[in-house]
Image (cartoon, rainbow, N blue to C red):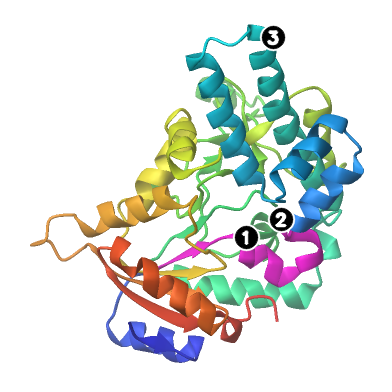
Amino acid sequence: MEHFEDFSSMMASLQKKRRTVHLLVGNGFSMAYDPQIFSYNALADFVVKMDDPLLSEFFAVLNTKNFELIMDQLTTFSKLLEVLKVDSTIQSKVFEAHAKLKNSLLDAIKSLHPEHVFKIPNEKKAKCAEFLENFLNTGGEIFSTNYDLLLYWVLMSQNIPRAVDGFGRDLLTSPEDVKQGVEPEYSELRWGPNKRQQNIHYLHGALPIFDAGTEIVKEQYDGESYLLENIGKRLDVGEYPVFVTAGNGDQKLDLIRHNRYLTFCYDRLCEVDGSVVTFGFGFGQYDEHIIHALNIAFMKNPNFPKKLRSVYIGVYSSETIDFIRSIEHKFYAKVYTFDVKSANPWH
């Protein structure tokens, strides 16, 4: 397994191959901006400080701050109770704990998150936009498993021309009335009008994206309230973002397949060609569904030139390299590693 010490030399190598290069980012992308806000420990510490007795006991008994692990344990426990035909009251308590944990995670992100896009220094947004354009300029797509607003804010505030998240506004006024001089009225931001050109994909959902039943809609800054304020208003009335919080890869994929927006994003990952570069994505035990998607992309018609050829995984240390080497056999495409610290998307 070849290792690149420098991000720039790796990208130059890919450029020589004239490859489409896609980007997959995980929590490490947000932690690179501020590890005090976006680490799992920060979210768990926030939940503990909420002083909810039930959740505090779960963290204590399971001895972990990993939300995905706790979600996985609760789901497994719930299935065991069902098989054993345990009293429904106990089953409902487990369901309540699962819902509480999901809601507390949303509350934690909302409370810890930078208040608005203007809190992010302009030079950091510009640097991140430059990083993202490395991939969009090759015709590549960007995939994120993060729930936060950082990627969204950078894409919107920097006016990156090639970035399309699939959302747009439908004309509600009839064309005939518009011709007669009636001022056109448009819908809220809906997913669909621009999905043919979509190259930004939130694989696990994100804070601004809501399932409104018949439509997938996107909350936005409206000139009167900041984006996070508008999201907060929806949360306060019991509306929740499209948000995959299940434990293991199978459970995540099950939730993805029950939402048409998430299904579309996942299927696009299954169709990537060229190469995929990862930043801050660990390929841990809860990420098997992502490896599965990349393997599907590799397995496209071998006689057809457009298929996934290689995956370049950002690593932080020799221990991380050893871990990737230990799971390299899970990938059908050729695997490389690179020093993720040399990429510097925010600096």
Quadrant (top left/top right/bottom left/bottom right) for the N terminus: bottom left
Any part of residue 137 in sight:
no
Three-letter amino acid code at the position of disc 3: Thr
Residue segment shown in magenta? 22-40
Category of crowding for the residue at label 2, using alpha-carbon neighbours closer than 10 angstroms: few (below 14), some (14–19), many (at least 20): some
Give the Cα separation between the discs numbered 2 and 3: 31 Å
Counting residues from the N terminus, which is met first, the one under dot 1 or under dot 3?
1
In this figure, what is the number of numbered marks?
A: 3
The residue indicated by pointer 2 is: 40
Give the Cα separation between the discs numbered 1 and 2: 9 Å
The residue indicated by pointer 3 is: 89
Question: At 22% from the left edge and 62% from the top edge, which residue is drawn?
Answer: 307
Q: Relative to 90, does residue 233 appear above or below in the rendering?
A: below
Three-letter amino acid code at the position of disc 2: Tyr
Q: Is residue 198 left or right of residue 345?
A: left
Q: Residue furthest left?
A: 303
Counting residues from the N terminus, which is met first, the one under dot 2 or under dot 3?
2
Tell me, yes or no, whether the two marked residues, 1 and 3, touch with CB atoms within 8 Å.
no
The picture places residue 318, in percent across and down from the top left corner, at 52, 84
* Element under disc 1: helix
Foreground tag (1 vs 2) = 2
Foreground tag (2 vs 3) = 3
Q: Which mark is residue 93?
A: none
Tell me, yes or no, whether the two marked residues, 1 and 2, touch with CB atoms within 8 Å.
yes
Q: Which mark is residue 27?
A: 1
Q: Nearer the viewer, residue 257 or 8?
A: 257
Question: At 55% from the left edge and 80% from the top edge, which residue is drawn?
Answer: 340
